[in-house]
Amino acid sequence: MPKLTIDELQKMRETTRKGIYLREGNFRGKVIVHMGTCGIAAGAREIMNAFLDESDQRKLTDIMFTTSGCAGLCSEEPIATIEMKGSPPVKYRKLTSEKVKKIFNEHIMAGNVVKEFVLGIGSERVG
Protein backbone atom coordinates (compact mmCIF):
# COMPACT_ATOMS: atom_id res chain seq x y z
CA MET A 1 0.00 0.00 0.00
CA PRO A 2 1.50 3.36 -1.00
CA LYS A 3 2.13 5.97 1.66
CA LEU A 4 -0.22 8.96 1.81
CA THR A 5 1.14 12.46 1.47
CA ILE A 6 0.31 15.29 3.88
CA ASP A 7 -1.84 16.93 1.18
CA GLU A 8 -3.82 13.72 0.66
CA LEU A 9 -4.36 13.38 4.41
CA GLN A 10 -5.54 16.99 4.69
CA LYS A 11 -8.02 16.45 1.81
CA MET A 12 -9.31 13.31 3.51
CA ARG A 13 -9.63 15.24 6.79
CA GLU A 14 -11.66 18.00 5.15
CA THR A 15 -13.93 15.53 3.37
CA THR A 16 -14.53 13.66 6.63
CA ARG A 17 -15.04 16.88 8.57
CA LYS A 18 -17.73 18.00 6.11
CA GLY A 19 -19.59 14.76 6.72
CA ILE A 20 -19.29 14.98 10.48
CA TYR A 21 -19.55 18.68 11.25
CA LEU A 22 -23.21 19.34 11.90
CA ARG A 23 -24.09 16.76 9.28
CA GLU A 24 -23.89 19.32 6.46
CA GLY A 25 -27.04 21.33 6.86
CA ASN A 26 -29.25 19.12 9.01
CA PHE A 27 -28.31 20.94 12.21
CA ARG A 28 -27.39 24.54 12.96
CA GLY A 29 -25.48 23.63 16.09
CA LYS A 30 -23.99 20.88 18.19
CA VAL A 31 -23.59 20.58 21.96
CA ILE A 32 -20.86 18.20 23.13
CA VAL A 33 -20.78 17.41 26.84
CA HIS A 34 -17.44 15.94 27.87
CA MET A 35 -18.14 12.78 29.86
CA GLY A 36 -14.88 11.24 30.82
CA THR A 37 -14.70 9.83 34.33
CA CYS A 38 -13.70 13.24 35.71
CA GLY A 39 -16.57 14.97 33.89
CA ILE A 40 -19.14 12.48 35.15
CA ALA A 41 -17.78 12.82 38.71
CA ALA A 42 -18.08 16.62 38.40
CA GLY A 43 -21.71 16.48 37.22
CA ALA A 44 -21.59 16.13 33.42
CA ARG A 45 -24.75 13.98 33.36
CA GLU A 46 -26.71 16.76 35.03
CA ILE A 47 -25.26 19.24 32.55
CA MET A 48 -26.36 17.10 29.59
CA ASN A 49 -29.83 16.83 31.12
CA ALA A 50 -29.94 20.61 31.58
CA PHE A 51 -29.07 21.17 27.89
CA LEU A 52 -31.67 18.61 26.80
CA ASP A 53 -34.32 20.19 29.05
CA GLU A 54 -33.65 23.63 27.55
CA SER A 55 -33.95 22.18 24.05
CA ASP A 56 -37.13 20.27 24.90
CA GLN A 57 -38.77 23.39 26.37
CA ARG A 58 -38.20 25.15 23.03
CA LYS A 59 -39.07 22.07 20.95
CA LEU A 60 -35.82 22.48 18.99
CA THR A 61 -34.90 19.92 16.36
CA ASP A 62 -31.90 21.65 14.77
CA ILE A 63 -29.40 21.21 17.61
CA MET A 64 -27.43 17.96 17.89
CA PHE A 65 -26.49 16.68 21.34
CA THR A 66 -23.61 14.29 21.85
CA THR A 67 -20.92 13.30 24.32
CA SER A 68 -17.19 12.84 24.18
CA GLY A 69 -14.49 11.66 26.51
CA CYS A 70 -12.26 13.71 28.72
CA ALA A 71 -11.18 17.10 27.39
CA GLY A 72 -7.93 16.79 29.36
CA LEU A 73 -8.77 19.60 31.76
CA CYS A 74 -10.17 17.77 34.76
CA SER A 75 -10.04 20.75 37.09
CA GLU A 76 -12.38 22.67 34.74
CA GLU A 77 -15.11 19.99 34.55
CA PRO A 78 -17.94 19.81 33.78
CA ILE A 79 -17.08 21.10 30.29
CA ALA A 80 -19.24 21.41 27.19
CA THR A 81 -18.29 22.48 23.68
CA ILE A 82 -20.78 24.46 21.62
CA GLU A 83 -20.36 24.38 17.84
CA MET A 84 -22.65 26.67 15.84
CA LYS A 85 -22.51 26.75 12.05
CA GLY A 86 -20.15 29.38 10.77
CA SER A 87 -18.50 29.97 14.16
CA PRO A 88 -15.50 28.44 15.92
CA PRO A 89 -16.22 25.91 18.66
CA VAL A 90 -16.45 27.31 22.20
CA LYS A 91 -15.52 25.31 25.31
CA TYR A 92 -17.37 26.31 28.47
CA ARG A 93 -16.00 25.41 31.90
CA LYS A 94 -17.22 24.57 35.41
CA LEU A 95 -20.81 24.36 34.25
CA THR A 96 -23.94 24.41 36.39
CA SER A 97 -27.60 24.21 35.41
CA GLU A 98 -27.85 28.00 35.75
CA LYS A 99 -24.86 28.54 33.49
CA VAL A 100 -26.41 26.15 30.94
CA LYS A 101 -29.58 28.28 30.84
CA LYS A 102 -27.55 31.41 30.16
CA ILE A 103 -25.39 29.67 27.52
CA PHE A 104 -28.49 28.26 25.85
CA ASN A 105 -30.29 31.61 25.75
CA GLU A 106 -27.33 33.77 24.78
CA HIS A 107 -25.09 31.52 22.67
CA ILE A 108 -27.29 28.85 21.13
CA MET A 109 -30.41 30.97 20.66
CA ALA A 110 -28.91 34.46 20.11
CA GLY A 111 -25.42 33.69 18.79
CA ASN A 112 -23.50 35.55 21.50
CA VAL A 113 -20.65 33.78 23.29
CA VAL A 114 -20.98 33.95 27.09
CA LYS A 115 -17.41 35.11 27.71
CA GLU A 116 -17.40 34.79 31.51
CA PHE A 117 -17.77 30.99 31.28
CA VAL A 118 -15.38 30.39 28.34
CA LEU A 119 -12.39 28.11 28.66
CA GLY A 120 -11.33 28.45 25.02
CA ILE A 121 -12.51 29.38 21.54
CA GLY A 122 -11.41 27.57 18.37
CA SER A 123 -9.92 24.19 17.57
CA GLU A 124 -6.50 22.94 18.43
CA ARG A 125 -4.42 22.15 15.37
CA VAL A 126 -0.74 21.67 14.81
CA GLY A 127 0.67 22.58 11.41
Image (cartoon, rainbow, N blue to C red):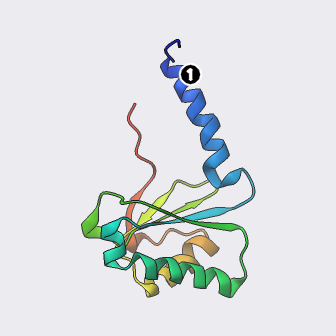
- Residue, far front: 1
Is 40 on the left or on the right of 48, as rendered? left
Q: Position of residue 120 (x, y in %)?
A: 38, 59
Residue 32 in the image: state x and y as whole percent. Answer: 51, 64
State the residue lying farthest toward the left.
75
Position of the C terminus by quadrant: top left
Residue at image position (60%, 68%) is 111
Mark 1, residues whose alpha carbon is within 10 Å: few (<14), some, or many (≥20)? few
Q: Nearer the viewer, residue 37 or 117?
A: 37
Residue under label 1: 8
- Residue 57: percent from left, percent from top: 67, 87
Quadrant hosting residue 117: bottom left
What residue lies at 59% left-to-right and 79% top-to-bottom? 52
Q: Quick check: 27 above or below 126?
A: below
Q: Under tag 1, what secondary structure?
A: helix
Q: Is residue 18 left or right of residue 76?
A: right
Q: Is residue 73 above or below residue 4?
A: below
> Is 40 displayed left or right of 10 in the figure?
left
Which residue lies at the image location 44% right of the left edge and 78% below the top edge? Answer: 45
